[in-house]
Amino acid sequence: MTMEKTTEPIWWGLFSAGGVVAAFLVPIHIILVGFALPLGWISDSGALYRIWWVKLYLFILIVLPLYHWGHRHYFTLNHMGLKPISKLLAVLCYGGAIFGTVVTVWVLLKI
């Protein structure tokens, strides 16, 4: 019996990592940027986004939930009866996440 090579473990890993980020980091980020910063509890001079580890944090915060979304959306559409076009769905869902990754890298390198 031979096993077929597949990329599915990669997508499941990114799905899992994106779920963890969405569950733990996004709420903290919302509290910091959505409440603490506007209410004056913390201050931001704008220079914070030029630090490499802040850029890494933002990359993780943005990109991993994109893969979580792509994988979840792909399987949801398949279960809704669109399985005959699953290859197209995979390209659109995972391609969207990959495109979001490229845009995120580009933006973070520009700031």
Image (cartoon, rainbow, N blue to C red):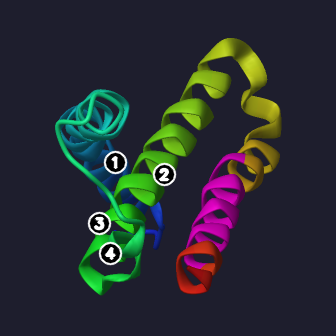
Quick check: 4 left or right of 2? right
Name which residue type carries label 2.
Answer: Tyr
The magenta span reads: 93-105
Q: Quadrant of the N terminus?
A: bottom left
Residue 67's disc number: 2
* Amino acid beneath label 1: Gly
N-term mark: 1 or 4: 1
* Residue 94 inside the magenta-drawn segment: yes
Horizontal relation, residue 79 to residue 69: left or right: right
Q: Residues within 10 Å of mark 3 (few under 14, many from 20)?
A: few
Q: CA distance from mark 4 to mark 3?
A: 4 Å
Res 3 → quadrant: bottom left
Q: Return the mark for residue 18.
A: 1
What is the crowding at mark 4: few (fewer than 14 residues within 10 Å), some, or many (at least 20)?
Answer: some
* Residue position marked by numbered label 3 in the rendering: 57
The mark lying in front, picked from 2 and 3, is 3
Q: Earlier in the sequence, mark 2 or mark 4?
A: 4
Circles 4 and 3, Cβ within 8 Å, touching? The answer is yes
Which quadrant holds residue 40? top left
**C-alpha separation, residue under disc 1 versus residue under disc 3:** 13 Å
Residue 25 x, y percent position in the rendering: 22, 44
* SS category of the residue bearing label 1: helix
Marked residue nearer the N-terminal end (2 or 1): 1
Which residue position is annotated with label 4?
56
**Residue at image location 72% in from the left, 30% down from the top:** 83
> Pointer 2: residues within 10 angstroms few (<14), some, or many (20+)?
many
Q: Kindly indicate whether the residue at mark 1 contacts the one at mark 2 (C-beta within 8 angstroms).
A: yes
Of labels 1 and 3, the one closer to you: 3
Viewport quadrant of the C terminus:
bottom right
Mark 4 secondary-structure assignment: helix
Q: Who comes first in sequence, dot 1 or dot 3?
A: 1
Residue 63 horizontal side relative to residue 47, left or right: right
